[in-house]
Amino acid sequence: MQFLFVQTWDIIQGKEEEYTKYVIDTHTLAMELPGPRLVGAYYVEVGTGPRIVVISPTDDLSKLYGILTNREHLDDLLMLRSLVCNYSTSVLEPLGALKKKEHTVQKGVWKMNLFYNVNPGTPKERAEAIVEEHLTLLKGLKHAEVTGGWSVILGGTSEYIVEMTFKDPTDIGRLLKDDEFRKITNKMRTEYITNYSSNILRCTERFDDPKWFRL
C-alpha cells in the first residue's frame, strides 16, 4: 500500500528566480536521494490551499519519518522555507481499491479534489464506508474519472479527500452543472459530512523539466 506525502506552498513574491534554481539544483535532489521519490506537482488554479502541491508516494511510513527528521532534510527545508510561504504537509492513506495501486502523477490532466470531514462522533469504520459509498456514486457520473479516495492521517485540515481526474478542463464545468453530481453532493453535505470544500488543480511538468513551475 502506498501512502502519499504531500507538501504545499506559495512562492514568495520577488524570489521566483532564486526559488527556481534552488528547487531544481538542490531541493529535488535532496528529497529523491534518500526517498520518497518526487513524482510530480500541481498548481491550484481555483479553490482552497497554497498554489503549489508536491506529491511523494511511499510504502514505508517509518522510513518517511526518519527522512523528515534527518538533519540534512531539515537544513534543506529551512532553506526552502526562506523562499516560500504558507508551507504545510500532510500524509494520506489510500482507501478502497486504491490501496493496491501505485500512485503516479499524470501529465496533461486536470484534477478536482473534494475535502471534507465526516460528522463528528462517527466511528472510523462507518466514516470510511461513507466515503467509499460516495466514491461509488461519483464513479457512475459522466465527465470525470474518480482516481482516488484518501484518509488524512497526519497534517492537513480535512479528514478525507476525494480525487477526480479530467482530460479536458471544460468537463469540470460540465460536472458542476450535472444534476446528479449536485444531488449527490447535497445529500453528502446534508446527511454525512461537514467542512466541505474543493479545489481545481492543473498538473505541472515533472521535476526534471527546468520550467516545471511556470505557466
Image (cartoon, rainbow, N blue to C red):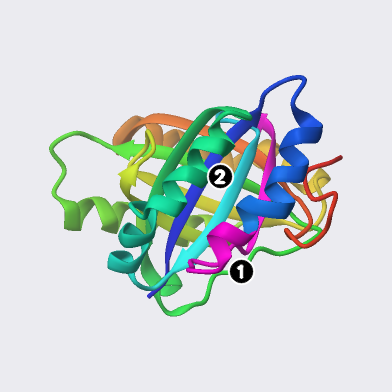
Between residue 61 and residue 29, name the one nearer to us: 29
Q: Position of residue 87 (x, y in %)?
A: 51, 32
Q: Position of residue 44 (x, y in %)?
A: 67, 37
Residue that appears at 72% across and 36% down: 19
Residue that appears at 63% across and 56% down: 28
Residue 113 image label: 2
Amino acid type, callout 2: Asn
Q: Where does the C terminus fall, quadrant-wise? A: top right
Residue that appears at 45% across and 71% down: 98
Residue bearing the label numbered 1: 104
User: Is residue 133 toward the left or the right of residue 210 in the image?
Assistant: left
Q: Position of residue 73 (x, y in %)?
A: 45, 52
Dot 2 surroundings within 10 Å: few (below 14), some, or many (20 or more)?
some
Picture layout, residue 119 above or below residue 57: above
Q: Is residue 36 magenta?
A: yes
User: What span is colored magenta in the figure?
Assistant: 29-46
Real-space CA distance between mark 1 and mark 2, rounded to the nearest whole angstrom: 16 Å
Q: Is residue 144 visible?
A: no
Quarter holding residue 196: top left
Q: Is residue 89 magenta?
A: no
